[in-house]
Amino acid sequence: EGVNMFTGDQAILDECFRRGIYRTYVIDTPDGKSALERAGIQDNPYSIISKSVVKTSKGKRSGKQIAGATATATSVSPNKPQAEAAQRPMEFAGDLPMDHLAKLSDLCEGIDSKLSKALSYVRMNTPDVFAELQVEYYEALLSLLANKAGSSIDLQKILQSMELFEDTISRFSRSAKGANVKTIYGTILQQLAGKVKNLFE
């Protein structure tokens, strides 16, 4: 893991490429392809990514493919643990209070709505790193809630994280959007997205 410090727009864009956000929400979607056409890079969408980053990514993918082939050859059912986990029922810590269930439902709806808006923006516009970070953040929150839905968790921690994340987005939108400002706010947003999984540890 470690701390990734942004050094400008290119660094943020490269990081989104590394995380797969650029391919998932831009290259592999009809709306994203339209955005690439409007930007004039539909035939070479990776032209805006640093060549060294693309080259490194290709090397990692090749290594993973080799490792995957080896694992498949030595295992009768490599996906058996995941399949068994999916079949297991959700474990409950006990009967959750009605008010907690109501708050959980409201929170889930709110996060899902924000994620939907962020996805729509990414698909309909030229690649926007800050919008892509919003997608990553809200998806991480929903994943956390899905994993912890059967437990009595402190929803206030999630609300506090969301408040800081959305306040950062708001501050950036009101700023002059200079390179240094983008670096600072981009780093904050990336760190918040990365810390979601540790909210209850």
Image (cartoon, rainbow, N blue to C red):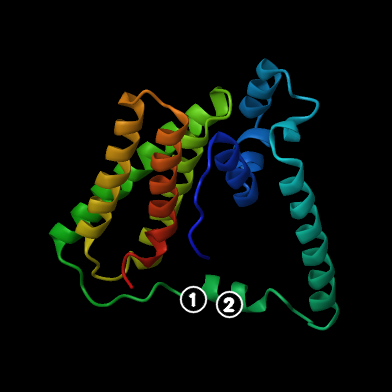
Q: Decide: marks 1, 2 in contact (CB < 8 A)? A: yes
SS label for mark 2? helix
Q: Is residue 189 visible?
A: yes
Vertical comparison of 89 with 60: above or below? below
Amino acid type of disc 2?
Answer: Glu
The residue wearing badge 2 is 84
The residue wearing badge 1 is 88
Amino acid type of disc 1?
Answer: Arg
Category of crowding for the residue at label 1, using alpha-carbon neighbours closer than 10 angstroms: few (below 14), some (14–19), many (at least 20): few
Vertical comparison of 15 with 145: above or below? above
Give how far apart the Cα atoms at labels 1 and 2 are: 6 Å
* Image quadrant where residue 95 sits: bottom left
Q: Is residue 155 left or right of residue 108?
A: left
**Where residue 55 sits in the image (x, y, percent)?**
79, 49
State which quarter of the image contains the C terminus: bottom left
Q: Residue at x 22, y 64 (%)?
A: 154
Category of crowding for the residue at label 2, using alpha-carbon neighbours closer than 10 angstroms: few (below 14), some (14–19), many (at least 20): few
SS label for mark 1? loop
Is residue 201 or residue 68 the one in the foreground?
201
Vertical comparison of 21 with 128: above or below? below
Q: Residue at x 69, y 38 (%)?
A: 49
**Where residue 173 sits in the image (x, y, percent)?**
35, 27
